């Protein structure tokens, strides 16, 4: 059983269950609440309650139960398929969908959907929780994601990811008016040393991360941009754009300003995905249309 320990700092005073859900990546709040009821969360050495409001200098420890790999069920969930053949599948992931099962999220994920669609014919390299998954995008990020149907396809696409030859373009709306027409953020990303809930530019312990961006359209207080990734670090675009003073609109983790728009998470869309086919070697490029909410938001911003 793995135990996580942390001392609460200034600005982290919130409910125990909410704080743990943010600090422990991959664990849902409902799962954490269940663990708290079972006495696996301690505050200053005593069992904590989910609604306990943490205070500065509180010592929190949380024991994560030994992982028992569950049987992941195929579920008949509609998929927006952008490309498919015998080796790979590219889907347009909707906002709010988790890519693969994790504690608290064993159903309704993209993996549950593709297990049904592909009748279980997926690569097994990443184990039973992530069959076919080579890369992922955040729950509230929409757009193109590639699924591998066999191990050869998985190994080939994974090699392209490692070599930074996978072509990935994102669309985003950021706070503020970006002055330059284009630019590059080359800054290593790692865990935020002051806040485990977040990733951050970390010169000491981070891994290389490079994001290229260019302006597509400017508005009065926001900018519509394209981002191209050389690397694929966790929350890379969100962290990099925040680091240069232009956090993504709707980003509740890295954003610093409130928005009048009713958004569910960051305004980020995996627009284009290009790769060399694992069998034919031919270049395949797939585009995921902007989701309706994104299109409507652009229309609103044009009128403001």
Image: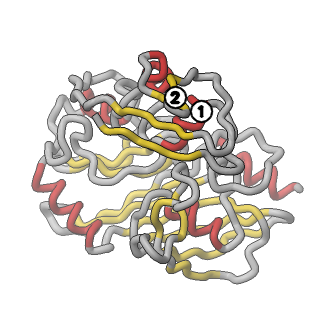
In terms of image quadrants, where is residue 284?
A: bottom left
- Could you tell me how far apart the alpha carbons at marks 2 and 1 are, in whole angstroms? 7 Å
Q: Name the residue tied to disc 1.
A: 18
- Residue at the outermost front position: 45
The spot of residue 228 in percent (x, y) is 49, 71
- Mark nearer the N terminus (2 vs 1): 1
Tell me what residue is drawn at x 51 percent, y 77 percent.
187
In terms of image quadrants, where is residue 101?
A: top left
Q: Does 43 sit left or right of 164 as displayed?
A: right
- For residue 75, the mark is none
Does the image show residue 295? no
Tell me what residue is drawn at x 42 percent, y 25 percent.
40
- For residue 29, the mark is 2
The spot of residue 70 in percent (x, y) is 23, 24
In the image, residue 30 sits, relative to residue 150, either above or below, namely above
Contact, CB < 8 Å: mark 2 with mark 1?
yes
The secondary element bearing badge 2 is classed as: helix
The secondary element bearing badge 1 is classed as: helix
């Amino acid at each position: 059983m793995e135990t996580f320990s942390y001392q609460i700092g200034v600005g982290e005073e919130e409910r125990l269950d909410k704080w743990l859900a943010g600090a422990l990546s991959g664990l849902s709040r409902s799962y954490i609440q269940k663990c708290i009821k079972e006495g696996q969360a301690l505050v200053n050495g005593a069992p904590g309650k989910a609604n306990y409001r943490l205070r500065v200098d509180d010592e929190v420890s949380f024991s994560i139960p030994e992982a028992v790999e569950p049987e992941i069920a195929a579920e008949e969930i509609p998929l927006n398929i952008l490309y498919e053949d015998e080796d790979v599948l590219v889907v347009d992931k909707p906002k709010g969908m988790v890519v693969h099962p994790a504690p608290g999220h064993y159903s309704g994920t993209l993996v549950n959907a593709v297990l049904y669609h592909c009748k279980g014919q997926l690569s097994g390299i990443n184990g039973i929780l992530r069959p076919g998954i080579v890369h992922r995008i955040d729950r509230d990020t929409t757009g193109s994601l590639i699924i591998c149907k066999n191990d050869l396809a998985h190994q080939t696409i994974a090699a392209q990811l490692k070599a930074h030859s996978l072509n990935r373009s994102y669309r985003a709306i950021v706070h503020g008016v970006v002055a330059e027409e284009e630019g590059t953020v080359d800054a290593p990303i790692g865990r935020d040393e002051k806040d485990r809930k977040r990733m951050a530019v970390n010169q000491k312990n981070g891994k290389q991360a490079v994001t290229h961006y260019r302006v597509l359209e400017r508005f009065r207080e926001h900018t519509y941009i394209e981002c191209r990734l050389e690397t694929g670090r966790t929350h890379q675009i969100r962290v990099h754009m925040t680091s240069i003073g232009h956090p993504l609109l709707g980003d509740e983790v890295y954003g610093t300003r409130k928005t009048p728009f009713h958004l569910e998470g960051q305004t980020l869309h995996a627009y284009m995905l290009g790769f060399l086919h694992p069998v034919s070697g031919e270049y395949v490029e797939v585009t995921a249309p902007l989701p309706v909410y994104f299109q409507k938001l652009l229309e609103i911003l044009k009128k403001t």
